[in-house]
Amino acid sequence: MDRFQFTNGCIVRVFILIPAYREAQVIGDVIRNLHPLKHTVVVINDGSPDNTADVARAAGAIVLTHCMNLGQGAALQTGLEYARRQRADRVVTFDADGQHSPDDVTALLHAMDEKDVDIALGSRFLGKAPGIGWLRKLILKLAVIYTNLSTGLRLTDTHNGLRALGATAIDCIQLKQNRMAHASELLQQVAEHRLRYTEVPCTITYTPYSVAKGQKLFNAVNILTDQTIGKLHK
Amino acid sequence: MIIQFVLASMLSLIALLAFMRSHKAPVIGFPVMGLACLGIIFVIFPNITQIIANHVGVSRGVDLVIYVFMAIMLVVILDIYLRIQAMLDRQTILVRHICLQESERG
């Protein structure tokens, strides 16, 4: 049974959304590590050519499958739509590559409850990111400056896939960016809808697998281009 | 002379095709037809481009043609890109719809 107990005694439904593309190697362990939390784990299989879906299903997750690869943003939006239809009270977005810690899921949910916010955002720079390269750190810091200036938010980590959304945020957020610019788009919508937010320290664990699978640093240029074109397209 | 004949023939064909398609896509058809006809005139009377170029401050007629062509192509490329983006958006909606329907069927 999926549940998370608020401090005021309410039982709520928490869905953990994991967009996944070609993660058959690690997705099973990622899902099993979340089992102790007893939340509903939903893997959005983004058109993976390998057996990511089968491994995820065998590990106990609900699996939604895109018939073709669209991108992490699109997968997340599909997950949000599913959670909305299932009347989820809370949604936590979680990376499929094993970078995130299940302990931080609980920390985000507690922070949402204690600070009464609509969205809690994980921050590696308030927490820990052992093994982060200097170039990656520099590009992430520049992204923080750019996002804070363009949105008016005050954040320390703007490209962290670990987030907890409350019912209001689940209803408000509508991601149109299919690929990696969705992270910036989500924050743009947090600002536009004036959602109450907080940042929570989290741990990002960089492994050779996650670094190889993760965003290439040059992708920052693509993200900026996608954002600009997205605004033009509006 | 040979090149004038070849170019005028190609542009005539384009103008004809654009005219035939213009009832279905008038926004594209008529401008393409107009530009093709203008192209035929410039090919047969190349001095006209020089006269126009002198009036607008460009040194050579062929340079004027290139500049105008580049500007038109940039607009066309942007239009095509935005149309492709719109198609991708519709594709995303469709893929998501199929995904969620299949999840409801279980």
Image (cartoon, grey):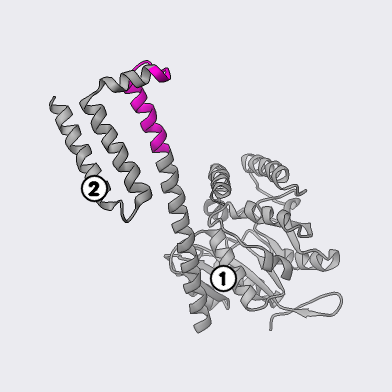
**Marker disc for residue B83:** none
Alpha carbon separation for disc pair 2 and 1: 50 Å
* A160 relative position to B98: left or right: right
Chain ID, mark 2: B
Instruction: State the image quarter where residue B73 is shown.
Output: top left
Mark 2 and mark 1 in contact? Answer it, CB < 8 Å. Answer: no
Q: How many marks?
A: 2
Residue at coordinates 63% horizontally, 58% vertically from top-left? A99
Q: Amino acid at mark 2?
A: Leu
Which of A27/A196 is in front? Answer: A196
Look at mark 1 in the image and give the residue it sits on: A43
| Magenta stretch secondary structure, dominant | helix
Residue at coordinates 46% horizontally, 68% vertically from top-left? B94
Which of A73/A6 is in front? Answer: A73
Residue at coordinates 32% horizontally, 42% vertically from top-left? B32
Location of residue A127 with respect to A134 vertically, above or below: below
Q: Residue furthest left?
A: B2
SS at badge 2: helix
* A173 relative position to A68: left or right: right
Give the magenta-colored segment's residue range: B55-74
Q: Is residue A52 visible?
A: no
- Mark 2 is surrounded, within 10 Å at the Cα level, by few (under 14), some (14 to 19) or many (20 or more) other residues, namely some
Q: Position of residue B57 (x, y in %)?
A: 42, 17
Indicate whether residue B11 is drawn in magenta.
no
Circle 2 or circle 1, nearest the eye: 2
**Marker disc for residue B17:** 2
Q: Position of residue A81 (x, y in %)?
A: 60, 71
- Mark 1 is surrounded, within 10 Å at the Cα level, by few (under 14), some (14 to 19) or many (20 or more) other residues, namely many
Instruction: State the image quarter where residue A62 is shown.
Output: bottom right
